[in-house]
Amino acid sequence: MASHSLDTLWEQYRQGRISRREFLQGVAAVAGLAGLQAIASACAPTPAPAAPAAPTATPETAVATPQPEAPAAIEPKWLIYSGGQDVPTLDPSDRTDYSIGAVGRQLYDRLFRFEGGFPRPIEPCLCERWEGSDDAREWIFHLTNKAVFHDGTPVTAEAVKYSYGRTLRFQRQRSNLLLGLLEEKNIEVVDDYTVRMVLNEPYGDFPRLLAYQEQWIMNPKVVKDHEVGGDEGEKWLIEHEAGSGPFVIKEWQIGDHYSLEAVPDYWQGWPGRGRLAGFTWRIIRDTPQRRIALLAGEVDFADTIGTEDVELINNTPGYVCEVNYGTLAGYFKLNNQKGPTADVNFRRFLAYAFDYEGYIKSLGGLGKLLVGPIPDGIAYHDPNVQPVYRYDLEKAREALNQTPYKDGGIELDFVYVTGLTFEEQAGLILLDQLSKFNIKLDMIPKVWPDMVAACNKPETGPDISMIFVDSGPLPDVWFREQWYSPTWDRPTGGSFQSCDFYKNPEVDSLIEQVRRTVDEEERARILKELQRMIMEDIPGIPIYVLPNLVAYNKRVKGFKYFGDISVDFWRLWIED
Amino acid sequence: MRLRDYVIRRLLLVIPVLFGLSVVTFVVSRMVPGDPVKLAAGPQAKPEEIQRLIEEFGLDKPLVIQYLNYMKGLFQGNLGRSMLNRHLVRDDLAKYFPATLELVLVSMAFAIVIGIPAAVLAAVYRDRWPDQVSRIIALSGISMPLFWLAIMLQLILGQWLRLLPISGRFDPRLPYPREITGLLLLDTLLLGDLKSFFVALKYIFLPALTQSLIALALIMRLLRADILEVLQKDFVRMARANGIPERIILFKYVLKNGLIATVSMLGFLFGFLLGGSVMVETVFNWPGLGLYSMNSALSLDFQPIMGITLFVGLLFTLVNLATDLMYGVLDPRIRYG
């Protein structure tokens, strides 16, 4: 309407029917009116964009567990999600940040999906069933013949081979779990819907590894159509997709927001009572800002909420903040190669000297103490592992007396990430207790790149550091990344996860064995033994599992926690 | 010296300035502790992957060779690629710069539109309430932590009153306006889309208001002092004695003379805001160069850090040049040489 009035005014002015002053007054009036309209619309809820046609999910097309019920009952609505991180690339062969995963798995399908529920079971997606050879080297995956890419072509074994092959050739973060284990030449297309993979070495838990590695299956034709100078679509796939997932890209605004629109006839159908018309991933990096945006009604769903905001959100009518525990676990990493922490009794002393319950209380009770070296969401976790270290000053004294430092008089570094108060708080609690033993703790905040660099080798590694680790659902990966000595004892050094610099040939050997074992019982036995040995040797001190906090407007339905920060948008719907 | 020669000489001077800047940034970014390769490769990276990244980005070569390679690329218009996600830095700068430019322009507009009349009022009503109010605003602008102010504005105007959006650049529920210049306010006007224009205005309001505060405070105090100084001059007394109306004295003679220092500072402020919008962009999730530079710095992504520094450095020197030229326009006594 405003533009129409402006056109009329301009036409009148051009024809000399009104003066310049009258024209300018008219423009001001139109602009003022439009401003009032904008202010009025700012105070009213913004309507969602027009929704696509009603969902057409059918039970036959759904491979996964959820059964659709009355899919047309709820009108599809748009959801605004607030993530704490940008989505810098969508390339299925590149990085694996949580935000990239959260958006990417809406655009692409993979062999397996985590459906909900925790600990995470392996659920079929493109792969309906699988078989492994007795020596755990040869694996056959049978694909569904129902899946189609967004251009309507079927998702075949050829696409699976291409997708894994591209990732192995690119050798970026996405390939880290596969390199050395699987080679492109050993991925074979048996027929249109069957793929065989032959591994370089046995891996008894290979399907779980693939479920966690989460290779998104690309449409080879679409990728090849967008190649520039033989780059295998590298530049194009940063901001575009070639998938078969439940959503397609609608709008891609770098650094600001990303909008995805639902595929009405998605091959798996739509679970629940309805579905979303689409969703927008809106980047709000700061925790308090996400809470403000949620409670201001600007977003419907927000992840990584601050622990201090849980109560406020739950006390606000219409909102809920869920507290779940995944596998992001905090450890005190102790330098096993130099200084007092190289002494096993000194490490035990530290493990008994820390006030675990007091620490959790200081966090408002949000946090679950670790029992053993791996969180209880990991397969083969042993809840009865011994010893379990808890605050006990007598035992701490006993352990300290067996070291050359029984009179104290020493100083240790405690390194933590700058600005992370929950890490600083842990250090302060330890500092307080160590002072009773005449031991001084030097609190050193470092930015994350510095911490990564410090963990490169034992000489630069701090005495004690607080590090958070999440190695997914594969137990052997947890041990391999943290306590397998070839992980850090190599020319390129270690990562922040191996900052204990632990070396025990027996543990190394068991970690190698567990990968080769197909037998479930044998694997459980080895993993149980590994947990016991790590607790006995206590290379680092397992502290707690960080709560995973998401908050949402109660009109959002269908949220199921599956051990990850992000949500499965496929399952959600909005009810007003 | 003619104006043209002066401009050419100043433009040539930009080359050594940028060269020096590139050397310093290059050395500093390589010397700071941290391990960008490990960050980019991820925690599960195999040694071969780490080695491959080192070779891909030429980090295995001596520092001098690395620098020469960088400069070689620079002369071919190539600012390198991000180690983290392989984006071309040149493309990223083109994407993020318009958002920052728009924010700075609107902030400057706020500062000028509010600051100049406020300074005039403060000077005219010296030591009376308009002066006291402007003094409080100016002092707050200088001394109040901007991030605190930003959060308060978000809390009050966003969460409680629900009047203004607290983050982002445009309503994600609406179709994003077609980009012409990348400046959303301008683009929506060019498209004749007034609705989107006002949406974009709502989104830029809080970040621009926050960002403008320092500039506003400086303009208010500097201009007030200059106006008071000019008001004491003989020619003002003479004008008054000749019965020239006070309004004409103030706006025609005093303000023009008093503005010289402020205008020269505007150029500096513009450059300052262009290069220093990190905090505001972070708090308001404004997708501009500030946010881009912060993310790059946190992950020690060398190439974007270099690219941003050189780009902002170039802008800063050009804005300084423009300011100097403007100075001459306002004060004809100034000669270039």
Image (tube, coloured by chain):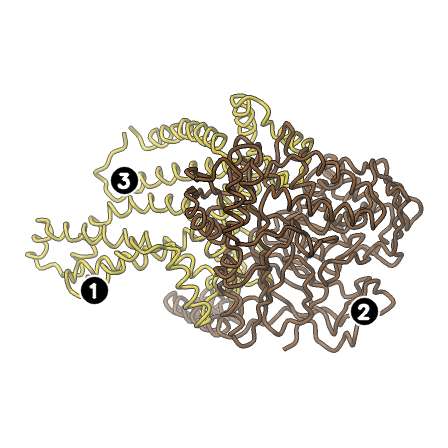
Chain colours: A brown, B yellow
Q: How far apart are marks 1 and 3 (CA)?
A: 32 Å
Q: Measured from the top left, where is residue A93 in percent x and y?
A: 72, 43
Of B292 and B92, the residue lying toward us: B292
Q: Give the quarter of the figure containing the C terminus of chain B.
A: top left
Task: Give the amino acid type for the residue marked by disc 1 in the picture.
Answer: Pro
Query: SS class of the residue under badge 2?
Result: loop
Residue B176 appears in the figure: no
* On screen, residue B24 above or below B105: above
Look at the numbered disc 1 and give the secondary structure of its residue.
helix
| Residue drawn at point x = 23 percent, y = 40 percent | B332
Label 3 chain ID = B
- The residue mark sitting in front, 2 or 3, is 2
Q: Name which residue type carries label 3.
A: Gly
Q: In this view, does B315 lie to the left or right of A573?
A: left
Q: Mark 1 = which residue?
A: B130
Q: Name the residue under label 3.
A: B328
**Residue A381 rendering spot, x and y as whole percentages:** 71, 53
Same chain for mark 2 and mark 1? The answer is no
Quadrant into which the N terminus of chain B falls: top left
The answer to whether residue A140 is left or right of residue A458 is: right
Q: Which amino acid does label 2 sit on?
A: Ala
- Within 10 Å of the Cα at label 3, are there few (<14), some (14-19), or many (20+) other Cα atoms? some
Q: Which of marks 1 and 3 is nearer the N terminus?
A: 1
Residue at the right extreme, as displayed: A191
Same chain for labels 1 and 3? Say yes or no: yes
Chain ID at mark 1? B
Q: Distance between the residues labelled 2 and 1?
A: 67 Å
Number of the front mark, 2 or 1: 2
Badge 2 density bin: few <14, some 14–19, many ≥20, Cα 10 Å: many
Point out which mark residue A57 bears.
2
Q: Position of residue B74 (x, y in %)?
A: 53, 30
User: Depth check: B67 or A300 in front?
Assistant: A300
